Amino acid sequence: MRAYLIFTGSGPILILTTFPVVTDDRLVAKLRHKGIAKFIAYEVPLDRTSRLYGVPFEVIAADLAGQEDLRVLDFNGHHIFANFHLSELGEPIRHGD
C-alpha cells in the first residue's frame, strides 16, 4: 500500500492505494473517472500517514486489503497541509498535459 498527496485542479487530496505506482494505467483511469485528468503527486510516508490519521487510515486500509484500488483518505486541503510539511515531499510525479 502507498499514500500519495495529489494536487488536482480543485485542490489537494490524500489517497491510499494498492497500485504499485501512482502512474499505473489502472489508477490513472480511476482518477480520470473521478474527474482528475491531470495531477502532480508526491508519495508520502505510509507510517507517518497511519500515525496522523489513526482509525480512519486503518478502516480504509482494511477496505483496500486484497484488491487493487484507491480510496481518498482526506480531501480537506487545509488539514492535509497542516499535517505534511513541504520539506517532507520528494520529487513530484506529474501526469497529464
Image (tube, rainbow, N blue to C red):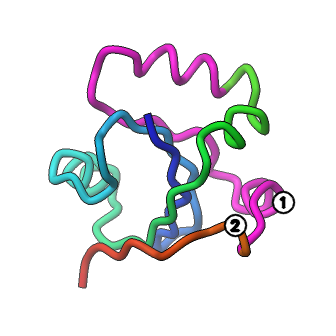
Q: Position of residue 25 (x, y in %)?
A: 15, 53
- In the rendered image, the residue lying farthest to the left is 25
Q: Position of residue 38 (x, y in %)?
A: 33, 73
Q: Is residue 72 magenta?
A: yes
Q: In the picture, residue 51 is in which quadrant?
A: top right
Relative horizontal placement of residue 6, taking residue 29 as reference (left or right)? right
Relative depth, front residue between 33 and 58:
58
Which residue bears the numbered disc 1? 82
What amino acid is at disc 1? Ala
Counting residues from the N terminus, which is met first, the one under dot 2 or under dot 1? 1
What amino acid is at disc 2? Glu
Relative horizontal placement of residue 56, taking residue 67 as reference (left or right)? right
Relative depth, front residue between 32 and 1:
1
> What residue is at 60 percent from the left and 17 percent from the top?
59
In magenta, the rendered stretch is 57-86
Which residue bears the numbered disc 2? 88
- In the rendered image, the residue lying farthest to the bottom is 97
| Disc 2 secondary structure class | helix
Q: Is residue 74 magenta?
A: yes
> What residue is at 70 percent from the left and 61 percent from the top?
77
Crowding near pointer 1: few (<14 within 10 Å), some, many (20+)? few
> What residue is at 68 percent from the left and 25 percent from the top?
56
Q: In the picture, residue 64 is in which quadrant?
A: top left
